[in-house]
Amino acid sequence: MKIRTTSLLTVLSFAILAACHKPNEEPSSTYPKQVTIVYRVSSSTADSLVSITYDNETDGQSTAENPHLPFSKSISKTVNKYDIITLGFFVNPAKPVKLEIIVNNQVVKAQNYSVPNAAMSYSFP
């Protein structure tokens, strides 16, 4: 009887531990990791902007001067958890502009603006 109770408690303990065990994170969510980032800027008007600024492959910022819309720039970079990337623009006078940040073919941030300059950022979870 005592062996049966001990066995039952052991089995229940393992069952509880197994139920509480978190599954392993997907390999794609481990850091650091290599990602492809696409910065996309568009507008309902066919003009150009004064400038577009974005984070580049070397953790610096790049600026495209007088870019025609739609604008798209693709980079590959290694990122760590909580790294932040940014995308911004400047235009005069103000007009509708849409900014998008795409990571590994998935839109992670998109925003529409109707101001002369704006920027947005994305933090890797």
Image: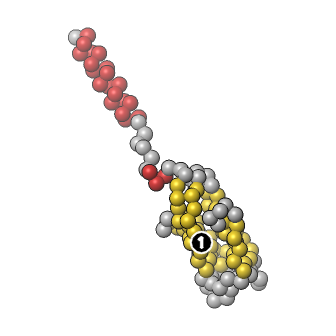
Residue 69: quadrant of the picture:
bottom right
Q: Quadrant of the N terminus?
A: top left
Task: Give the residue at x 34% y 27%.
Answer: 14
- Choose between 20 and 102: the one closer to the eye: 102
Give the colouring mode of the picture.
secondary structure
User: In front here: 79 or 113?
Assistant: 79
Residue at the extreme bottom: 46
* Residue to which mark 1 is pinned: 39
- Neighbor class of circle 1 (other Cα within 10 Å; few <14, some 14-19, many 20+) is many
Asked which secondary structure carries label 1, the reply is strand
Give the percent coordinates (x, y) of residue 6: 29, 15
As displayed, is residue 32 above or below residue 109? above
Looking at the picture, does residue 56 appear above or below residue 114?
Answer: above
Q: Is any atom of residue 115 visible in this view? A: no
Amino acid type assigned to the residue bearing label 1 in the image: Tyr
Name the residue at 53% across, 50% down. 31
Answer with left or right where residue 73 lies relative to residue 64.
Answer: left
Q: Going 33% across and 30% down the picture, which residue do you hit?
A: 15
Q: Which residue lies furthest to the front in this view?
A: 58
Residue visible at 41% across and 42% down in the picture: 23
Q: In which quarter of the image is residue 76?
A: bottom right
Q: Position of residue 85 (x, y in %)?
A: 64, 62
